[in-house]
């Protein structure tokens, strides 16, 4: 495949030329891929080697009533998916939530992390470096924050192990998801550490961050937004709309999400949180690889005086209302549906997403629970 | 928001009507969302409440040389992403792989699982049920396979725990990812178990499957396709193109992917496998929530007589060349780029994807390793 | 410290001489350590550098009624511990179990594993080696079993990853815990593999065994004996003897063992299984380091029509009735208390131990649950 | 079995009577069990239903040179074990450490935790309770510390999840391991929380402590003493005494402890840390069930300019020099061997133990690495 193909341009013609070259190379016909409306110039910071666009069907769920600190009221939630029945199911969950007066939701953690790994001489040196960091935290803060307009360094946690020293930097990143911001700021601070301590940075990410991999550390301590949400659904609504019962759902959650997840050695315990996150992340221009962290969510159900109490704890919801894919046209519009585009909206977005996750869990647990009841009913009918 | 909005239609007009209603409800202007070319009728089984499409910029990497059992030759690999630099980086990895003669890749496991949870009376009853299953495996096979043209039940593994009995069904699903196929087949077999043993199915998914959640069980035993890939990159190429060295990359992989991941309590150890998987999954109509399982990949680097040996083990690559989102126009075209659309192509697709994952890991490890060298060089230059 | 000290003898005089030298070196006075009755010659295969004995207070719990396959009837269970209240608590659990007619118990898995790691050339070579093993499994069985009178090789599971090939050998080890037996047999088979395939054994234990470390693999698949036990305790007994209630215990188990364990990223979910195992292991000459694997136990509680259903699943109970520390005098006598010394008794021992574990869990959950009730009562009494 | 048996006395006669009754019940002859020298009165707080003592052969390793903050100089380390070759192996490790000038060791964390779980009304209530705790931390400190002479409450970390609120209390416990101290102090503080917030304590241990179960939380954040140790062993010594090489040991550690542990889903990565901990815990009267937490140790090896760098990070070494089993005669004497009995000695004890762990890891890695070399030599010799 020739060099001509890999032109670096961002005009429509450049895109066409590349797409053509791909067709030539592969004998694929890329007519639909070519049917995009996005201006390639506007996607400059989002992709290289662009040949067109993938179109993902976009739908929505809701309105769902959200009783949050940042999101208050009824919201429609956009979801881009190719999995039939997902939206219908989450939508049912939304209407169940509404029947209970809406869902409560709170952001209990808000910090993005980056953890470089340094090579040190050993145990004694590691402690010297840690001491130095403790005494010079203000200079490190200055170095880190000199690289960013919005980011604030909240703290550095140290984990020495042999000749390795992991430093977990935590930042407040305002309304951006903030991974790049944190990486650049951490590099700057790390250079200061290197110059003063003899520690050598081996990688700006030492995997104790932990980005885009499932890690107990994030499940426990959180990363990005940590969000909890709950609601109570009246028994009558459960029976009417899910054909299950409160006790059946509680039992399903116990056997499936708690016992089953534990026996499989899972991080997190839920039905299908990744589904809702993926659909919302794609719709709103979030990083879909970060669905991984959100998938460690805990879903719990209890019988609340005959009604259903259901909750989710999403330990690591890494989203932003500015930057990254949010700048693209369809993604920005999707954010607009929730009035979540731009500055000052990231926490609102996190709250709405958590409620949509709750809706999806509720609906699926209801459906799975009704399975055995349905069958029981069928038998009784004979 | 009125009922009228939620029309169930699949014409363009239905889509328009819904989008309009969303605009009215939310005051968002959804012009870009409306700029889709996909026929909504064709997305009938992929979405509900459709209001348009999300456009994700589509690019590609390659050509990359693949020495697989099903994929042989040079391939371009489509990726849909909004993360700048991802494609450029993976592309660099591809050319490094080519410089070493391409990547070897093998599919070492191919089965999709579904694990219902049953309620039993206790320890003794659980063992009776397990005995019954052992004696009636053929009838269960018949029941399961009666629901599917392609799926084959390979076996059932039993995990009793108190009043819970988890049965992990494994299937060969031909060229489909096969989750739905397995669910339906498992339900059918489970009904037979219920009728004959007194065990009561509580949920067709008991989370020992484990779908869309990170679970050690899948990391160890695999789900979907388990794929391993490797290659050797000449030292000169590493130094020339990454500005790092073989030893620096090996050290980065050791400190970051092995030690750092372990200290974070991670399942899997890699740099950013979820990135490549998400971009390819979205481009080709796979289920993006299943990136979660693939993110448990192990990436290893060794010094091979002065050159770089690098490998990945993807324990759970849940992909198909038919069904689901692969039927959509842009997604199908993306598959065409690799000649991976339709029957007989799933294993080929898995092999190519694994090599692209390897390329992405290689490139990022190189970049992170060069970071500290680069800085050292800068200092020397002063 | 002189060489004379480290005599290699096993007479009482040798022991005295060493103890004296330790006293000289350290200024400790070791009068109690010297007060042992064990014949050092008999401990030849159990220790080096012997200077005396540690005396651990030995008590017992029971009788407890066991309804097992190998253990049937009432048993006293010896426990060696220095933790006050442990025996009293487990004893209370035993009498609760008796009040419910005893505990059911079954051994559902019985195999000891050893997993060497081999260095291979890469992906393709690994698969060649695996193929060779598949075709020569009988020769490997012969090689392995040539080293042992009792051990039987049940199978070999292969896990390739880059230049690593892990082979998990499973054995039936008769009445011995069998770790050494498996190691020797595996070495023999591994030599055959090395000679025929070019794979190089790097370590006879590659940590996928996994011995004496907590690993999801063993929690899921089991190692040594996998044992499940349960019982039902009448509500009246619960209220009378624990001052808690069935619902309180079920709630404690849910919030503590299921939710709390999950949030802490635990392998297993229980209250204090390691306590019972350690006390029984020490009393009966088992390897106390293998308590680690047993600690991954799952304890579950349910309301069974108003009574308490409680169960344990011990995934890896690595015990024997012959070999190791069981040959020592006090340890052998402890086994005698349960009629579990010698050949044909390992499974019986495993069943009794599992019931004692169940008793300990029951009692502690009762006590913790009564905590808040007790306080509530106190408040009501004001 | 009669009531008479279960006398509650602590005289030798009481012990005799019980032992007799056990003999009658079981037909075991308990002559060796009766051969103890410990005064039962002195074991009052350590056991109930005492019938004698288990004798565990006691040996020692060392002297080993320790370069710690609290332990400086050469120490003999007592180990009680029934596993032949363990002491010989650790001893070899000690002499290797000495050949490198001794081991460096530091205690980097020192706090014991207890995490009760409370029932709250839901998300909003949980946050109210957390707010109240933040504002009343001093009163809680007072309440907690009113129950203990030595314990200091260091902080409380809150983890809300649905209707559960976990509060992880951290204490400094002076020279005691301190579990009981923490439990009592936490109960006192929890009563204050209950009275003021409406939260209901369900269990004083909610398993986020996490005691005697393997949990990522402790591996990451530590519990009891967190200790790191390292040393460098000259290449010549490695080759001379282990018949392995530096590179072979580094490779073994990489393939076995890092890759193998990761693939098994382990918490921690080491060869056999639990062995050393169990033997030292039993010898010195520590709680052997807490070996579980220590087993999550990380062992690392690197080539240090041709010599071997080896280190351990023990995240949770829960030991004390006062209280519990340390008060018993043989156990106290074992502590005396290291001059670690009584007040002011806990950190010294932790440092010495960590070095013994390092010695054991070093020796076993050497032995396993020599395995394949040994074989290679054997072949060459033919």
Image (spheres, coloured by chain):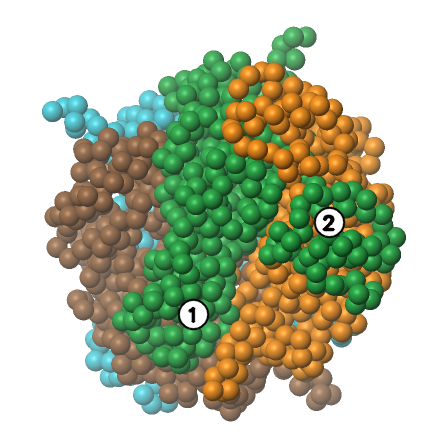
Chain colours: A green, B orange, C cyan, D brown
For this rendering, which residue is in front, B50 or D43?
Answer: B50
In the image, which disc is placed on residue C171?
Answer: none
In percent of the image, x 33 and y 42: which residue is there? D166
Q: Nearer the viewer, residue B374 or C227?
A: B374
Residue positioned most to the top? A382
Q: Residue D318 vs residue B256: left or right?
A: left
Can you see residue D157? yes
- Residue located at (63% from left, 35% from top): B31
Which quadrant of the structure image shows residue C369?
A: top left
* Quadrant of the frame with the N terminus of chain C: bottom left
**Distance CA(mark 2)–CA(mark 1):** 36 Å
- Does residue A162 appear in this view? no
Residue at (27% x, 36% y) in the render: D128
Q: Position of residue C340 (x, y in %)?
A: 48, 49
Total labels: the figure holds 2
How crowded pointer 2 is (Cα within 10 Å; few <14, some 14-19, many 20+) is rated as many
Nearer the observer, D140 or B45: B45
Which residue is tagged 2?
A: A52
Q: Position of residue B14 (x, y in %)?
A: 69, 22
Q: Is residue B344 left or right of residue D176?
A: right
């Amino acid at each position: 495949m020739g060099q001509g193909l890999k032109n670096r341009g961002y005009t429509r013609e450049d895109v066409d030329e590349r797409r053509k070259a791909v067709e030539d190379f592969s004998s694929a016909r890329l007519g639909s891929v070519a049917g995009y409306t996005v201006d390639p110039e506007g996607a400059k910071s989002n992709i290289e080697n662009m040949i067109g666009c993938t179109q993902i069907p976009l739908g929505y769920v809701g309105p769902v009533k959200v009783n949050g600190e940042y999101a208050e009221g009824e919201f429609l939630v956009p979801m881009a998916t190719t999995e039939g029945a997902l939206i219908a199911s989450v939508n049912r969950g939304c209407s169940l939530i509404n029947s209970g007066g809406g869902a409560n939701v709170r952001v209990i953690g808000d910090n993005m992390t980056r953890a470089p790994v340094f090579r040190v001489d050993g145990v004694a040196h590691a402690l010297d470096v840690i001491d130095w960091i403790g005494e010079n935290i203000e200079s490190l803060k200055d170095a880190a924050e000199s690289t960013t307009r919005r980011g604030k360094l909240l703290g550095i946690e140290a984990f020495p192990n042999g000749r390795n020293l992991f430093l977990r930097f935590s930042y407040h990143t305002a309304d951006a998801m903030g991974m790049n911001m944190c990486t650049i700021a951490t590099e700057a601070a790390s250079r200061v550490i290197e110059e003063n301590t003899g520690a050598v940075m081996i990688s700006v990410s030492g995997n104790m961050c932990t980005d885009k991999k499932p890690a107990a550390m994030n499940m426990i301590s959180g990363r990005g937004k940590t969000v909890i949400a709950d609601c109570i659904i009246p028994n009558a609504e459960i029976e009417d709309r899910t054909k299950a019962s409160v006790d059946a759902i509680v039992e399903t959650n116990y056997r499936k999400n708690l016992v089953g997840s534990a026996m499989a050695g899972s991080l997190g315990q839920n039905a299908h949180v990744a589904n809702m996150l993926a659909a919302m992340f794609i719709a709103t221009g979030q990083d879909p690889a970060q669905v991984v962290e959100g998938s460690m969510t805990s879903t719990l159900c209890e019988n609340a005086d005959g009604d259903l109490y259901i909750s989710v704890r999403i330990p690591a919801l890494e989203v932003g209302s500015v930057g990254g894919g949010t700048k693209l046209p369809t993604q920005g519009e999707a954010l607009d549906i929730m009035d979540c585009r731009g500055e000052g909206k990231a926490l609102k977005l996190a709250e709405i997403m958590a409620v949509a996750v709750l809706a999806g869990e509720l609906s699926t647990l209801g459906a799975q629970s009704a399975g055995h009841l349905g069958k029981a009913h069928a038998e009784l009918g004979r």
